[in-house]
Image (cartoon, rainbow, N blue to C red):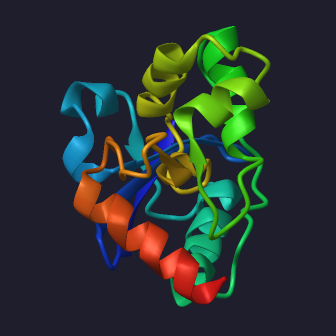
Amino acid sequence: MYYCRYSSPLGNLLIAGAEDVVVYCLWEDTIDERMMATWEEDKSEKSTALTETCRQLTEYFAGTRKVFRLPLRLNGTPFQRLTWLGLQQIPYGETLSYADLAKLTGRPKAVRAIGNANHHNPLMLIIPCHRVIASNGEIGGYAGGTARKAWLLEKEKLNK
């Protein structure tokens, strides 16, 4: 698997995948380095998927991209993949509660499991887990940190 770093206004993202598919987009400071043991840095840009991801992230942070259109490989349990597909239905600049996402995925009683799957999202920003908040309107958690989540939500709200 190839990887590259993307320098965002909120810190580095590590993006990893094969030549034609993206598998990970994670905040660098949240990654266990053992995970990267077999990854090869994409210095010669062999992966067109990683290059395209960086281009689309630049557009996202500039406020001109609202939806990512990338070839993704979702590695997770069937329930996690269902949750991650549900996350992709949340429009730019909008939020859903964990309970609403559970209903959207057809699992209305699985609110805690939805939160857990959300926490294990391997494609942060691309699959917008930051758009899920608590039912009481509080920001809730975010694997990348609540300061990043608040920044992302505010930026999307302003650029909607």
Q: In which quarter of the image is the C terminus?
A: bottom right
Indicate whether 119 appears above or below 75.
below
Q: Nearer the viewer, residue 21 or 99?
A: 99
Image position of 128 (left or right of 65): left
The picture quadrant where one finds residue 52 is bottom right
Q: Which of 38 and 21 is in front in this view?
A: 21
Image mark count: 0
Indicate whether 63 appears above or below 127.
below
Q: Where is residue 45 in the image (x, y as percent from the top left)?
A: 56, 64
Q: Which residue is drawn at 59% across and 17% down?
A: 76
Q: Position of residue 71 (x, y in %)?
A: 77, 47
Indicate whether 28 appears above or below 38.
below
Q: Where is residue 58 in the image (x, y as percent from the top left)?
A: 55, 80
Q: Which residue is drawn at 54% across and 33% down?
A: 98
Q: Which residue is drawn at 77% across and 47% down?
A: 89
Q: Position of residue 140 (x, y in %)?
A: 35, 44
Residue at the extreme front? 136
Image position of 129 (left or right of 31): right
Q: Nearer the viewer, residue 135 or 55?
A: 135
Q: Residue at x 73, y 61 (%)?
A: 91
